Image: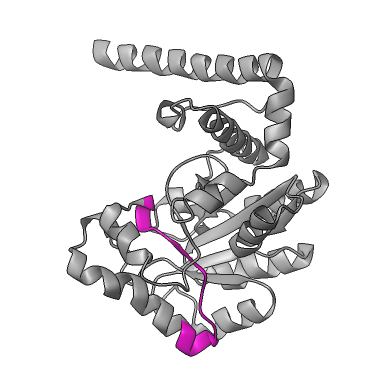
Amino acid sequence: MIMVRLFWKIFRAAVVVAALVALFIQYKYKDEYLEYKQHAVPYLMYHSIGIVPGWDKDVCIPEELFAQHLQYFSEHGYQVITAAEARRKLLTGEDVAKNVVLTFDDGYNNNYTVAYPLLQKYGYHATFFVIGNSVGGPDYMTYGQLKEMQEHGMEIGSHSMSHDPLNIIATGYLPWEIYQPINLLRQHLGVYIEGIAYPNGAYNQAVLAEIHKYPHIKYALTGKAGCNTTKIVRETPFELRRMGIYDNGNGVTGLERRLEKAYLVGFLESKGVPTDWLYKLTVPKI
């Protein structure tokens, strides 16, 4: 009991520290922070759009809440684009103020039946990373559905062949994990995909070396928090940042906090400040 109380005291203190950091940046570096936000793009990570019995709630966003998220973006003037489009804009120096990338991992069927129609309703485009072995399986999208989505402005990417963390896979199997999904998607969609998302955000130097062998791959998403900037997409295109979106019971406020955390962590990183400690903390919207 004493240890539990101590844990919660430390946790609450850490949350206070995070809030103070956010407020400090707001007032001390307000102009720099606002300027950073004009040139940084948050990439948000979703999974299942809809509650599926027996599935981990961490990967499920209720349909109603996702609809509220899209309404929030619309009301607050955000432009929702694909990861490929964000990369192009950042590299060519186009305006990315209030641009946000929505990504969906795993390729669940409700991404097609629920998320896709809602995105179309708002005229938004998003990126869907699918697991090679799972396409067409129970609860997963088919190649026909993926092709339809692609033809209507959605981007399709790879989430590896098996979804096993790439950093623990023997080097000899990496070509199959990385290239085979590209090959399959090329066969069924008629184009080479540009991006991949590492399962669990995990990678290592062997994974980076393997990815460099395939010129068709232009970017890869990690599990690092923050935003992506021109500097990041140029210098480390296979280590892009992304922020997970989960249902924490706070409704749209939860989305606002995750967005603000992405900007805050990205800004601190741009200043050379270590940010790993901030990732798991709740940061209030500034």
Q: Position of residue 98 (x, y in %)?
A: 74, 45
Task: For residue 1, say whether it is visible.
Answer: no
Given residues 274 and 157, the one toward you in this image is: 274
* Residue 197 lies in the magenta-colored region: yes
Q: Quadrant of residue 160?
A: bottom left
Q: Quadrant of the N terminus?
A: top left
Tell me the residue at 50%/65% (across/down): 218
Q: Is residue 100 above or below residue 31?
A: below
Which segment did they paint magenta?
186-201
Q: Position of residue 71 (x, y in %)?
A: 76, 51
Q: Is residue 57 above or below residue 35?
A: below
Q: Quadrant of the C terminus?
A: top right
Query: Taking the image as drawn, is residue 258 in sight?
Result: yes
Magenta stretch encompasses residue 200 = yes
Residue 62's place in the image compared with 85, above or below, is above
Residue at 51 percent across and 74 percent down: it is 193
Going by the image, does 197 lie left or right of 125? left
Q: How many marks?
A: 0
> In this image, 145 relative to 29: left or right?
left
Q: Give the vertical position of 169 relative to 32 (above or below).
A: below
Query: Which residue is at 43% across, 51% downward?
Result: 222
Residue 186: image location, x then y, percent: 48, 84
